[in-house]
Amino acid sequence: MPPTSAISGLSCLIRTVSHRSFFGFILSGLMSFLFSGILTARAVPIDAEFTRDWVSGWLPSWAVAFPAVLIPAPITAGSWRA
């Protein structure tokens, strides 16, 4: 059986990673939602098709934004402490 300190350290690591992942998920979703909406409104007229165009542009941009937020997160989180 592993020592208690090892278990608590692992638990802390799992919580940190899950918090960063959740934060990255929300951040990338909101930012890509806003920017794709603004850019869609500038590119096409706001009519009955606008929402369909916006969502069809937002989902792929979120697929790119989420890893783009998660990859540098551990690097930047440690850099401000140094």
Image (cartoon, rainbow, N blue to C red):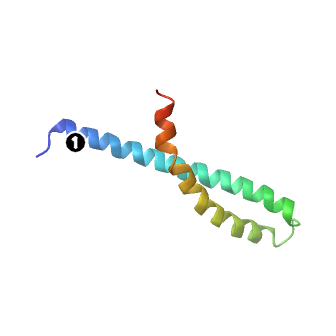
What secondary structure is found at the residue carrying circle 1? helix
Residue at 20 percent of width and 35 percent of height: 5
Q: Position of residue 2 (x, y in %)?
A: 14, 44
Nearest the viewer among 65 and 56 is: 65
Identify which residue, 60 or 72, lies in the foreground.
Answer: 72
The amino acid on which the numbered mark 1 sits, given as a three-letter code, is: Ile
Viewed as shown, does residue 56 lie left or right of 10? right
Q: Position of residue 12 (x, y in %)?
A: 33, 40
Q: 4 above or below 80?
A: below
* Residue at the image position 48 percent from the left and 40 percent from the top: 75
Q: In which quadrant of the rendered view does residue 43 lie?
A: bottom right
In percent of width and height, residue 55 lies at: 70, 67
Query: Which residue is label 1 attached to?
Result: 7
Q: Is residue 39 left or right of residue 78?
A: right
Q: Residue at x 64, y 66 (%)?
A: 60
Where residue 82 appears, x then y in whole percent?
Answer: 46, 26
Badge 1: few (under 14), some or many (20 or more) residues near its Cα, within 10 Å?
few
Q: Residue furthest left?
A: 1
**Within the image, what quadrant is residue 37 found in?**
bottom right
Residue at screen point 49% across, 37% down: 77
